[in-house]
Image (cartoon, rainbow, N blue to C red):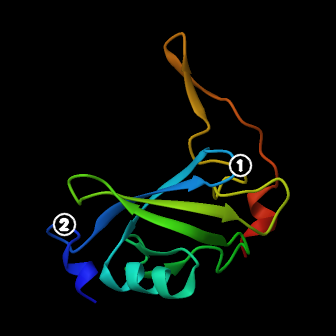
């Protein structure tokens, strides 16, 4: 898999990844991948990340059921950031964030303070065991 060698992995063997909703263009989340996560994502057509806090592969939706179906994998001009175009599955409307929101980028700076700009679509306590 020579294509994996073209990615500029950081000192920890990771590359940053942005997940974007294919249908709307909404930026859903930011995560990390190692070589295995990227290879599995390409193979399965499902987002697989590397969780730094867990220290292991993290199949998006493995606990919540909020799986990301991957349609397109792109790399930036410097080969050091990836973009996944996805369809977020498991809830309607879609939930990508562990807070129960559509996007992890729900906080907006307004008048010098951060405010939630998107509603909680499902209580996180009911999502995670």
Please indicate whether residue 71 sits to the left or right of residue 14 in the image: right
Which residue bears the numbered disc 2?
Answer: 8
Please indicate whether residue 76 sits to the left or right of residue 66 in the image: left
Q: Could you tell me which quadrant the C terminus lies in?
A: bottom right
- Vertical relation: 42 (above or below) 22: below
Q: Could you tell me which quadrant the N terminus lies in?
A: bottom left
Q: Position of residue 19 (x, y in %)?
A: 52, 57
Q: Quadrant of residue 82?
A: bottom left
Q: Position of residue 115 (x, y in %)?
A: 62, 26
Q: Give the CA distance from mark 2 to mark 1.
A: 31 Å
- Vertical relation: 98 (above or below) 9: above
Residue farthest to the left, as pictured: 11
Counting the numbered discs, the total is 2
Q: Which circle marks residue 101 in the picture?
A: 1
Mark 1 residue crowding within 10 angstroms, few (<14) / some (14–19) / many (20+): many
Residue drawn at (31%, 57%), measured in percent from left and top?
Answer: 81
Comparing 116 with 80, the one in front is 80
């Amino acid at each position: 898999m020579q294509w994996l060698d073209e990615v500029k992995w950081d000192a920890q063997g990771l590359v940053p990844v942005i997940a974007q909703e294919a249908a709307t263009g909404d930026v859903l989340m930011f995560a990390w991948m190692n070589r295995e996560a990227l290879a599995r994502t390409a193979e399965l057509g499902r987002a697989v990340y590397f969780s730094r806090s867990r220290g292991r592969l993290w199949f998006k939706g493995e606990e919540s059921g909020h799986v990301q179906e991957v349609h397109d994998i792109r790399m930036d001009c410097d080969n050091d950031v990836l973009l996944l175009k996805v369809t977020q599955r498991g809830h309607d409307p879609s939930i990508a964030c562990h807070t129960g929101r559509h996007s992890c980028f729900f906080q907006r700076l307004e008048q010098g303070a951060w405010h939630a700009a998107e509603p909680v679509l499902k209580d996180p306590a009911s999502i995670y065991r």
